[in-house]
């Protein structure tokens, strides 16, 4: 029988202390016939008891649970959520299990959620329904290939009056970015974000965590792209304020609360800061305190850095459409820095009538090596004449406007 914890003074919160029951027997069901009498069967029940209620794993919360998202989603989706909204979403994401084929309604106690966040005030009982209601109104966009998805985070929320329970369900449109991820994903413990005070800290933490294992040990992000990802274009228009209230504030929180820390370097074009180089480090016991960012002129950057920035600039100049530095870098990485391939596929795009996202189409075209369809020659005298010769180099120049 499962033990009833109603009279227990404390409830186990650590995953290690979760009771596990092992049944080792030739036949775990003595009233039925065992077709394999010599087989030893091991049954492990993983559950948590809270106020006398039994919760299977996935129906209760733990700070050591893992949040898992696709890298594409982290690096290419911009949204504006309050700190409380982000914590609700990330806590819910940590309850998704690796074996889940589909999202399911996740039911938990509001009091347990408050305890997890370290909130003691009872006003949150009335605040959380307001937060989830606002959260369902916040629609954001995911653009991938020819698809433009407009979705909210939650498909529904249900509160049981008088019980303190809430049941939340993710939108089904988020499944490709949170379920059954085998490659190109980022994962981290929920505990890394629970104590954060700045709404920008969880977002920057994910961006850096996504690039933690880059060979070069850093990531360059253009200021305009970073502002767009964080939705701070109109909140901190002055760079001084952006640096103080976003970058430096997040730097302190990540070093104090998470498993990574970062330094950053300002890359300037003339006197204007145009890019930020984030140096990502794993947290260690002996951390250097009071880290400050370094400021360097573009002229003093290494030859490799100059080359990288020039390539991104070159890619952006190829496109008639406006693309961001991050999008240009994604195309560049896919083409393995081969500008000729990028030009070739862009010229090919001019023959396509409808393209939803030029960036997504380009990445797919490079990966799958799209080619112009070849004409089928018919037998007979109809085309028995000298075919017109095309100067494709000249055609490319005209399409890209390089002939002027």
Image (spheres, rainbow, N blue to C red):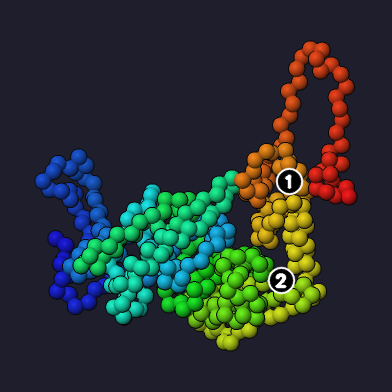
Q: What element carries label 1?
A: helix
Mark 1 neighbour class, 10 Å CA radius: few under 14, some 14 to 19, many 20 or more: many
Classify 65 as above or below 43: below
The residue under the point 22% across, 77% down is 10
Classify 260 as above or below 388: below
Task: Locate residue 88: give its quadrant.
Answer: bottom left
Classify 79 as above or below 357: below
Q: How far apart are marks 2 and 1 (CA)?
A: 26 Å
Mark 2 neighbour class, 10 Å CA radius: few under 14, some 14 to 19, many 20 or more: some
Q: Which residue is more in the foreground, 20 or 369? A: 369
Query: In x, y percent, where is residue 44?
Result: 26, 57
Please count the marks in the image: 2
Query: In x, y percent, where is residue 233?
Result: 61, 69
**Which quarter of the rendering shows the N terminus?**
bottom left
Label 2, on which residue? 274
Left or right of residue 197, residue 108 in this image: left
Q: Residue furthest left?
A: 31
Q: Residue 300 carries which label?
A: none
- Residue 30 appearing in the image: yes
The residue under the point 71% across, 42% down is 349
Query: In x, y percent, where is residue 275?
Result: 69, 70
Task: Locate residue 240: give its quadrant.
Answer: bottom right
Q: Which mark is residue 346?
A: 1
């Amino acid at each position: 029988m499962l033990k009833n914890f109603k009279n227990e003074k404390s409830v186990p919160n650590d995953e290690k202390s979760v009771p596990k029951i092992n049944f080792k027997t030739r036949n775990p069901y003595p009233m039925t016939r065992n077709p394999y009498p010599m087989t030893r069967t091991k049954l492990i029940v993983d559950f948590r008891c809270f106020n006398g209620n039994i919760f299977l794993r996935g129906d209760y919360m733990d700070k050591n649970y893992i949040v898992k998202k696709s890298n594409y989603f982290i690096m290419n989706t911009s949204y504006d959520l309050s700190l409380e909204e982000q914590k609700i979403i990330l806590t819910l994401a940590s309850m998704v299990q690796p074996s889940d084929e589909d999202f399911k309604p996740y039911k938990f106690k509001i009091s347990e959620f408050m305890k997890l966040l370290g909130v003691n005030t009872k006003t949150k009982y009335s605040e959380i329904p307001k937060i989830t209601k606002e959260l369902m109104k916040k629609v954001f966009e995911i653009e991938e290939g020819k698809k433009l998805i407009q979705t909210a985070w939650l498909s529904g929320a249900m509160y049981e009056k008088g019980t303190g329970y809430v049941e939340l369900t993710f939108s089904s449109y988020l499944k490709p970015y949170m379920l059954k991820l085998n490659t190109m994903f980022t994962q981290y413990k929920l505990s890394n974000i629970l104590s954060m005070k700045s709404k920008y800290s969880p977002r920057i933490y994910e961006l850096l965590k996504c690039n933690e294992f880059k060979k070069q040990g850093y990531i360059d992000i253009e200021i305009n792209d970073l502002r767009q990802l964080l939705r701070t274009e109109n909140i901190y228009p002055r760079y001084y304020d952006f640096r103080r209230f976003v970058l430096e504030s997040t730097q302190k929180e990540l070093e104090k609360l998470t498993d990574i820390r970062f330094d950053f370097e300002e890359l300037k074009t003339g006197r204007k800061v145009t890019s930020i180089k984030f140096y990502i480090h794993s947290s260690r016991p002996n951390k250097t305190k009071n880290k400050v960012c370094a400021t360097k002129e573009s002229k003093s950057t290494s030859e490799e850095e100059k080359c990288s920035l020039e390539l991104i600039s070159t890619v952006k100049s190829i496109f008639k459409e406006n693309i961001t530095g991050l999008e240009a870098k994604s195309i560049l990485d896919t083409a393995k820095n081969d500008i000729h391939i990028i030009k070739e596929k862009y010229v090919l795009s001019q023959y396509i009538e409808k393209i939803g996202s030029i960036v997504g189409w380009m990445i797919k075209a490079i990966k799958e090596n799209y080619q112009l369809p070849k004409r089928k020659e018919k037998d007979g005298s109809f085309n028995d004449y000298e075919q017109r010769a095309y100067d494709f180099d000249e055609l490319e120049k005209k399409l890209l406007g390089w002939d002027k």
